[in-house]
Image: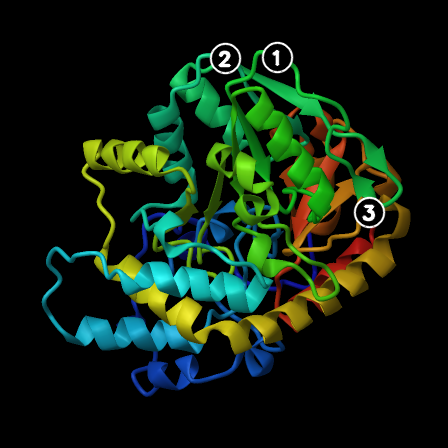
């Protein structure tokens, strides 16, 4: 299928869910501590082999030479500060229950002030020891909306999946597509409505929603007696020149009790394999119900590894993130220049590219399989993002420089 065999996908690499390789299986002379000291600005230009790490993204590489670009997971080394913090903590061989460090709430507030220029009350902050998807599920259980849950389309498929799993009535709202990208629905929400779920920035297109549109959506939700839940796991990956509207601070103060922001260090700092999240919940009553619902699942703030990663990422990860964003913007520009009108919306955040399959010369039905066959590139099928995603593909361009070179060369086969 391909003649540039980027990375072997033999059986031991293909079946990564059964990890048989550990760091000790490699050359004993290789000093792992040397790796974690590198700055991302030096590392992103080099190969980053994830063989033997159990990568679910690379498990999608179903044949030799396939480059998986579907899952939202960076093929770039994470911050040295996180690796070093985990190493330090691992050397202390007591891994028992831990309490929540209250300074973690202040750390989140300080991050929002420094990174986004907004004021978050530390009292709003909850630190669930689980990923954002699990936190959203438990939040919805705490709210238990009786009216339909609304979310846009195309949109991250997890919203629909959670609603189906919980038996919640739900409805997708089509997003209008303008020349500069998708727009949030311009009018009042359908009623009745129990909750509104939004990826902010938009997943799959990387669109940064305008501040006024987010404020308007928060007002409509509050006036409808609904909760707006803004999933902002890509918010810290907003590209230079754009400003991320943090939902709880963008909303009018009168409407903030009806707004929750969910975020995590996972996407931003490439550490989603250690589940953690933080929630900004201005309403004290909802915070209490959310905390009780977490406890019902045996989850309390203060996980050992979660707090270790959280402190290192938010406390020392800023310079690494700046270097990462510069790399992502350069990669985005190379791909959008090459793909031109096939790009439905030029990304303003994160590392996801949303493409029109027909403009690539691919069949709207079966585009994912055709791209895999012709180019050896694995993408996400747009149909996974609801009815508004039909005929589209999502590509992840968070890749080392040489791999991106290979991707661009393979796209010439279209």
Tell me whether the residue at label 3 lies in contact with that at label 1, contact meaning CB atoms closer than 8 angstroms: no
Instruction: Specify the quadrant of the image occupied by residue 366.
Output: top right
State the residue at coordinates (52%, 42%): 231
In percent of width and height, residue 165 lies at 41, 21
State the residue at coordinates (38%, 60%): 53
Choose the circle earlier in sequence order: 2 or 1. Answer: 2
Q: Secondary structure at mark 1?
A: loop
Q: Residues within 10 Å of mark 2 (few under 14, many from 20)?
A: some
In percent of width and height, residue 17 lies at 36, 48
Tell me whether the residue at label 3 lies in contact with that at label 2, contact meaning CB atoms closer than 8 angstroms: no
Instruction: Specify the quadrant of the image occupied by residue 37.
Output: bottom left
Q: Residues within 10 Å of mark 3 (few under 14, many from 20)?
A: many
Q: Residues within 10 Å of mark 1 (few under 14, many from 20)?
A: few
In percent of width and height, residue 163 lies at 47, 21
Badge nearest the viewer, 3 or 1: 1
Determine which residue is flagged by label 3.
343
Determine which residue is flagged by label 2.
147
Tell me whether the residue at label 2 lies in contact with that at label 1, contact meaning CB atoms closer than 8 angstroms: yes
Numbered circles on residues, count: 3
Q: Closer to the camera, 208 or 404?
A: 208
Q: Residue furthest front?
A: 254
Q: Secondary structure at mark 2?
A: loop
State the residue at coordinates (56%, 27%): 222
Relative side of 9 to 329, left or right: left
Q: Closer to the camera, 335 or 287?
A: 287
State the residue at coordinates (29%, 31%): 289
Determine which residue is flagged by label 1.
191
In percent of width and height, residue 58 lies at 50, 53
**Which of the labelled discs sits on residue 411, or is there none?**
none
C-alpha gap between disc 2 and disc 1: 8 Å
Q: How is the image coloured?
A: rainbow
């Amino acid at each position: 299928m391909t003649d540039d065999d980027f990375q072997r996908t033999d059986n031991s690499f293909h079946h990564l869910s059964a990890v048989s390789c550990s760091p000790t299986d490699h050359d004993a002379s290789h000093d792992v501590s040397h790796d974690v000291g590198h700055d991302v600005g030096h590392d992103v230009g080099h190969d980053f082999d994830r063989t033997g790490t159990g990568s679910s993204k690379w498990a999608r590489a179903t044949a030799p030479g396939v480059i998986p670009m579907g899952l939202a997971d960076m093929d770039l080394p994470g911050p040295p500060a996180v690796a070093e913090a985990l190493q330090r903590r691992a050397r202390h061989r007591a891994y028992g229950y831990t309490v929540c460090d209250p300074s973690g709430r202040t750390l989140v507030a300080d991050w929002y002030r420094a990174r986004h220029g907004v004021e978050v009350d530390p009292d709003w902050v909850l630190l669930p020891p689980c990923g954002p998807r699990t936190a959203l599920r438990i939040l919805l259980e705490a709210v238990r909306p009786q009216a339909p849950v609304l979310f846009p389309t195309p949109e991250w498929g997890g919203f629909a999946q959670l609603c189906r799993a919980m038996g919640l009535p739900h409805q997708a709202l089509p997003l209008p597509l303008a020349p500069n990208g998708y727009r949030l629905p311009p009018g009042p929400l359908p009623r009745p409505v129990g909750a509104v779920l939004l990826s902010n920035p938009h997943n799959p297109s990387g669109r940064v929603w305008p501040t006024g549109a987010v404020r308007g959506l928060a007002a409509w939700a509050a006036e409808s007696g609904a909760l707006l839940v803004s999933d902002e796991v890509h918010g810290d990956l907003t590209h230079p020149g754009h400003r991320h509207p943090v939902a709880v601070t963008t909303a009018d103060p009168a409407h903030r009790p009806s707004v929750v922001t969910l975020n995590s260090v996972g996407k931003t700092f490439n550490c989603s394999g250690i589940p953690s999240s933080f929630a900004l919940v201005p309403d004290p009553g909802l915070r209490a119900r959310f905390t009780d619902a977490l406890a019902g699942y045996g989850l309390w703030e203060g996980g050992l590894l979660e707090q270790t990663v959280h402190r290192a990422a938010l406390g020392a990860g800023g310079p690494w993130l700046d270097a990462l964003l510069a790399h992502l913007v350069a990669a985005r520009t190379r791909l959008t220049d090459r793909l031109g009108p096939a790009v439905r919306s030029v990304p303003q955040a994160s590392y996801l590219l949303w493409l029109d399959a027909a403009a690539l010369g691919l069949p709207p039905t079966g585009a994912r399989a055709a791209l895999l066959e012709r180019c050896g590139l694995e993408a996400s099928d747009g149909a996974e993002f609801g009815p508004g995603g039909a005929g589209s593909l999502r590509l992840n361009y968070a890749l080392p420089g040489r791999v991106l070179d290979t991707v661009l060369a393979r796209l010439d086969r279209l």
